[in-house]
Amino acid sequence: MAEHPEVLGGGTPIYKEVPVPPEPTPPVYIPIRNPLSLIPAYCFNIFLGVIGAHHAYLRRWAFSFFYVVTGGGFGVGWIVDLFRLNCLVDEANCKLLDPDYVTKKSCIDAYILWFPLGLFGQS
């Protein structure tokens, strides 16, 4: 009598049990905890911007202190921040997501630093 192909002489099966691989886990997305919004940032800037409340909201403590001491950068910084606030909120949210986030400097930073003292420079 012929033996079955899957069984050897002593009745031992010729296949080996292979463990089933685990199902892949879906990617984990880490949400930003309490992302900062533009609406409160603009409210702080419009109503309390001279004392740097919008910088405190964005956790920019050095700028907040500077605004308290100088009255919003003598009023100039407060007005400039009305136009920069969107970028400042984006940068603050990036820092919340990744604490090691390094801010890239742009030309707008140079223009803002140039503006108050550049008016009195050489022509």
Image (spheres, rainbow, N blue to C red):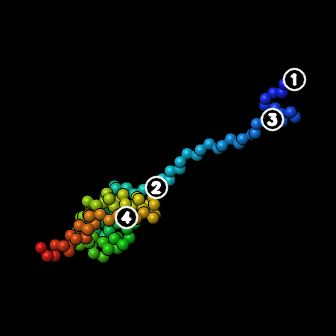
Numbered label attached to residue 1: 1
Label 3 vs 1, first from the N-terminus: 1
Q: Which of marks 3 and 4 is nearer the N terminus?
A: 3
Q: Picture quarter containing residue 11?
A: top right
Judged from the image, the secondary structure of the residue bearing numbered disc 2 is loop
Vertical comparison of 88 with 63: above or below: above
Q: What residue type is labelled 4?
A: Thr
Give me the residue at 59% from left, 44% from top. Answer: 24
What residue is shown with label 2?
A: 32
Q: Nearer the viewer, mark 2 or mark 1?
A: 1
Which mark is drawn over residue 103? 4
What residue is at 38 percent from the left and 70 percent from the top? 61
Question: Answer yes or no: do the residues labelled 2 and 1 have beta carbons within 8 Å?
Answer: no
Query: Horizontal and vertical percent for residue 103?
Result: 37, 64
Q: Quadrant of residue 122?
A: bottom left
Name the N-terminal-most of marks 4 and 2.
Answer: 2
The alpha-carbon separation of the residues under discs 2 and 1 comes to: 71 Å
In the visual, does 20 lie left or right of 106? right
The amino acid type of the residue labelled 2 equals Ile
Q: Kindly identify which residue carries mark 3.
A: 13
Residue 4: where, in percent of width, then height?
A: 81, 27
